[in-house]
Amino acid sequence: MTSRNVARIGGLAILMASVAAPAFAGSFYLQEQSARGAGRAYSGEAADTGVQSLWWNPAAIARSGREATLSLHAIRLDSEARNTGSSLTLINPANGQVAGRLPVIDPRNTEVNPVESGLVPNFAVAMPINDRLSVGVAVAAPYNFTTKYEPGSFARYDAQTSELRSADLGVTVAYQVNDWLDIGAGVSAQYVKAKLTSAIPSLTGNQLAPIMALDGQSSLEGDGIDFGWNVGAQVHKGKWDLGLSYRSAIEHELDGDIVQAMEGALKPRSFATTGTASFNTPWFVSASVRYAATDKLTLNAQINQIGWSEFDAINVNFTGGGDVIHQNYEDVTTGAIGLDYAYSDKTTFRAGIGYDPTPTTDALRTARIPDSDRMLYSVGVSTEITDGIGFDAGITYIDMDKAVMNDDRALLQGAVISNLRGELEGSALAFSMGTTIKF
């Protein structure tokens, strides 16, 4: 394997690391898919009916009638990343032993708000074909984040700019089997685009030069579109509504453009090339229950099992070779409880609490977005503006645990190891607004 091929593997690995970075709701997944659900911390979505629950359960539209929903979620994050001893390690090519180590110098030693705020939209429409059969179309953005570090940041050799954008187009068919059972199934086309930049240290002979002015730069982009499916069922008996759904993993393949620009003695190592990298997004199992405790009060609960272990490796292919880059993501179980209180025939208040653990581990967590366990606290309201037009709003406070950043990454064909050591603390507010129109 040539040194350029090794460099190509490294470049694609960095590209895929951006795709794998954590986002607002556990790794690179966003659960902000309904303004109504936001008001109760997404605690009853798989069991609730209507087009607003279509993302969680395709059976939700079996008896909803003609309706469309549009929501917008504004996520405001406040975070601070701190250096706890990041360094560069020089490796002797003759014997593979450590030849020297230098700290990564950052006069600030902190980065304010490296995780950027953003907007997340979603749209869905449902149309009945007859008394029992309905079809639906939904557009969602399940994976979406941006992180940016200053050029001289302690994290620059691990990450500078990381962006991930996605668009999921789903088509659903739902059927009312009888007066208490609904079933549904759907397929989706999911487009993913990733872009990032990072710094590369200078190396002259056996000497490291971790100085920003001498850094090389790596710029990477990739995109692709692939397909998945989902199924679900709902039971409606008396005061009880039960829901169970499954959303498949998706095998993604990104086509990537990679540019590495070096300076000085390392300028001959500059290159521009293309390649592909494949990875799996997780599967989801959601189980939900809603109980009408009184004529006005409904209690909600939901558990989600998320198969993050699907993201166990990145398979890289390029002209002349390939590689497998292993990850250590773990399956997680999230949960939420909430309530709906019908204040009047037109207005309902909501509240909820959720727990969202991270699938990443302290043994490997990059600076792309250092994910952590979090608690969600939500309140919301729904009201009927006029006949057939409703308005939903929700506010969620997210309390994030401290995240340890720990990543050892080989650079310059293994001649240098970037040892990222840091931690990040933060919190977030999500503001959700939406409308649902019956027509």
Image: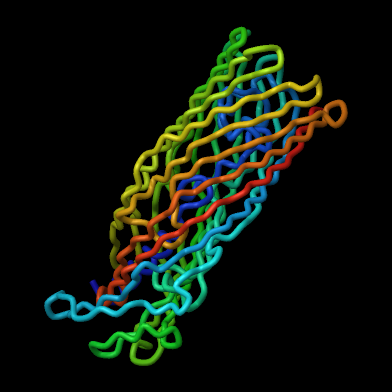
Residue under the image location 73 percent in, 39 percent down: 434
> Image quadrant of residue 293?
top right
The structure's colour scheme is rainbow
Quadrant of image for the N terminus:
bottom left
Q: What x and y, as percent, mark residue 98?
A: 18, 76
> Image quadrant of residue 315?
bottom left
Residue with the most extreme left position: 95
Q: What x and y, as percent, mark residue 218?
A: 44, 75
Residue with the most extreme bottom position: 264
Q: How many marks?
A: 0
Q: What x and y, as percent, mark residue 246?
A: 47, 30
Tell whether 227 sits left or right of 406. Answer: right
Tell whether 54 sits left or right of 329. Answer: right
In front: 377, or 36? 377
* Visible residue check, residue 410: yes
Residue with the most extreme right position: 386
Quadrant of image for the C terminus:
top right
Tell whether 84 sits left or right of 284. Answer: left
Residue under the image location 76 percent in, 33 percent down: 436
Residue under the image location 39 percent in, 38 percent down: 332
* Visible residue check, residue 177: no
In front: 260, or 204? 204
Residue under the image location 22 percent in, 80 percent down: 100
Q: What x and y, as percent, mark residue 146?
A: 55, 60
